[in-house]
Image: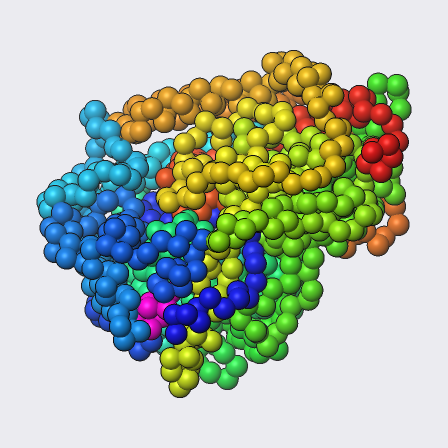
Amino acid sequence: MIERLTARVLLLLLSGYLVLPLRSAESASRDAVASPSPAASLGSATNSFRQITPGLIDGRVAFLTAAMLERNHYLKLPFDTALSSKFFDTYLETLDPQHIHFTQADLAEFDHYRTNLNRLTLSDRHVGDVRPACEIFNRFFERLSQRTAYAEQLLKNEKFTFNGNERIMLSRKGQPYPENLDAAKKLWRERLRFEYLQELLGKVAAREKKQAVAAKANGAPGAANAAGGRTRVTGTNVQVAAVLGADQRRQPMLPSPKAAAQWPGSGATASQTHPGSPAGAAEQTRSTAAPPKKTDEEEIIATLDHRYHRNLRFFADWNNEDVLQTYLTALAHVYDPHSDYLGRAQLEGFAMQMNLSLFGIGAELTLSDDGYCTIRRLLPGGPAIKSKKLKENDRVVAVAQGDQPPVDIVDLSLNKAVQLIRGPKGTEVRLTIIPAGGSGSDRTVVSMIRDEIPLEESAAKAKLIELPDSGGGKLRLGVIDLPSFYATFDAVNTKDKPEPKSTTVDVARLLKKLKEEKVEGIILDLRHNGGGSLEEAIKLTGLFIKTGPVVQIKEVDGTVQEADDTDPSVLYDGPLIVLTSRGSASASEILAGALQDYGRALVVGDRATHGKGTVQSVNQLRPYMHLVDSSLTNDPGALKLTIKKFYRPSGASTQLRGVVPDIILPSLANESKDVGESALNNPLAWDKVDPAKYEHFNLVEPYLTELRRRSSERLVSDKDYTYIREDIERFKKLQADKTVSLNERVRLKENEDQEARNKAREKERRARPEPQEKVYELTLKQLDQPGLPDPVSWTNGTMANISTRALTGPAGGGTNSAAAAAANSTAEDDLDDPTEAPASATDPPLAEAEHILTDYISLVPKGNLVTAGH
């Protein structure tokens, strides 16, 4: 059978989407304070936990996955004792990345597996032994249960004061595991104290914000307009978010409390609890009874107690498929950070991500500390918004399929709730909801038919920017925002076929519209683009050049092949900037690197792109399983496997080093050691091949010195970049320290200083004169309409309805627990009132790119730059 594993792969992809690590009980996000559910509600899930044992086909799946990795992975690494040891450590790290649950005694007990996992997995019977996966997870759950019980005890009995000199190391990655349970408890207590202080500081800040808002409303003229007519969503009362029907933009290979909503688990079933059951009755009692006013201490204790128990329940819901998913992904990550085992749910979500479509009701769900799943947003074009029966802030308490009885989802993990609500096109789902603002007794059953929901916000879009030029006329610039390289993808041969999708087709339509509107230069924004389809990256590059190699691909055997643009037509031949960041990965780096090598585009951005220069294939395991036993009906999932490396036309790989821009802009990402391919575990090395033959347009180098000089002069006096440089200096100090004070006064002073900085910056930004430019936002739906939509309105110098994304990490980040922890810490420390946005939704890199493009237009010759004279 092994010899047949070299069959051709199903689809070549370049996928660099962020893979979030498990944080186990580290879900100390600053959620809204709420009353906890009764202990029985969460305790029942904990008490019902049974020791997980391997499933019927788990051993065969493990054997097949290991065999394919050993034989078909680019590195051709044998699964020997050395790799077994790394596998053992990686699995432990995946479950316990902060090294606070497993003890040295646990490791000693399991150490006999360290150099035997290869032998156990690749047995002569073609059935691997996955008992180590279950045994180690069961011990993890035991420790997590002990931690939860200990936290509950501390919250009941300890008086929390914060007036000493304690400091806590937030990231224990790489630190020794605790020696014994007593040492572990010391770490658990330290973490709980940190979480308590976070909640306390959040309450202080919330009161101050509330008082400030009240003061503005009572005495300040125009206070209602102070936020520029905009709102934003922070981490205040949203723990996780999911699009029902599985809108998975970022793919954790392992469920976690925050990530579970985005990627449902691979088969755990929700308990059949009905509204009339004890748990349902307890939930209704909690909803209808008006709780007495609690003190800060009581609210914080309630919040943390519920959070710990909900986290424990999350893992209590795991089954053998969830454990296998985690275990085999750990094995794949020993080979490289972009190989993954995909259970069926993960594979379906991956397909949805590529297709920019999902099948469900079209609603986005959040989970807060009170255990309710709440409608955060209704997606355009979905059954939910069309029905007019659901609205934002409705709470979903039960889900029923067709004429089946409802399943209670209060306190259920969001990944389970998502699995219940999503489903095939044309099927019925019934939701029991508490309307927004209603009490627990106000319940309504809403029935709707699932359908396909296009994810339009993840598709390419554009802006036309009109600004005065130096001669008294008007200059028009185009900006194309490309979040990913999407394409039609049906990895699981679903019955409901998605509408065909093509990045190149969509961008071509946007380019034609911008050309019709007489833009003189274009910015292609790839800052948030983590990759996608290789074929789309090649075709999209061809829109800007004539013909020639776009990427070179090195096979396992060392042979190198060129992937060329063969279409001689050029859709856009004017001045072009490619805007990148450390989040630009994979297919983004192919396009940016090719246009830079050709001298066709000026690359601007962070000091380098992400650095993912590898190609993956998605291999379904079912055909190989049938070679062994055709009677097996369970879906074994798929293996996303690194099989090739890609290189620029110049011969240099983008692996590890990425694409270095022609003009580098200051950013926090430039200073972080936890961002990029080099921050991941087991990345492939950088190398190069012989350069290909291609035409060099030389449209950048002659003007680069002058463009750099002008940009540097601007950045010296640019206020936003002054703030960025200040933030960089503070960030460097924080990185050097690695600890946080647990002294309340010290932390309050730090928060006050930060708040003062923020207010001073906001005051300065609000005082800025209104920009003279006009901005027209263009979506794919608007392109068939004549002319332009109304320009975006401006309020206090900023766009009132500007669309921004949070820069919490690179889309191509892979399994980087340190980077994710940093991003999560930022969300936890964000004490802003969610109803009051800062004055500036400014985007300094894009603003400077516009300035550079204006300079570039003034320097390059007028006319056809690509097809004339070359």
Classified by dominant secondary structure, the portion drawn in magenta counts as: helix
Q: Can residue 365 be seen in this snapshot?
A: no
Q: Position of residue 342 (x, y in %)?
A: 44, 63
Q: Residue at the location (35% across, 63% down)?
A: 66
Residue 830 shown in magenta: no
> Would you say 723 lies left or right of 236 here?
right
Quadrant of image for the C terminus: top right
Q: Residue at x 43, y 80 (%)?
A: 626
Where is residue 589? Give x, y as percent.
59, 41
- Could you tell me which residue is drawn at 51 percent across and 43 percent down? 612
Q: Position of residue 339 (x, y in %)?
A: 43, 55
Give left or right: position of 786 versus 250. Answer: right
Where 666 falls versus 484 (above or below)?
Answer: above
Side of 152 where 501 appears, left or right: right
Q: Quadrant of residue 772?
A: top right
Q: Position of residue 130 (x, y in %)?
A: 26, 67
Can residue 212 be seen at all in this image of the molecule? yes
Instruction: Report the front residue among 623 and 435.
Output: 623
Q: How is the image coloured?
A: rainbow
Q: How many marks?
A: 0
Q: Nearer the viewer, residue 702 or 528?
A: 702
Residue span colored magenta: 58-65
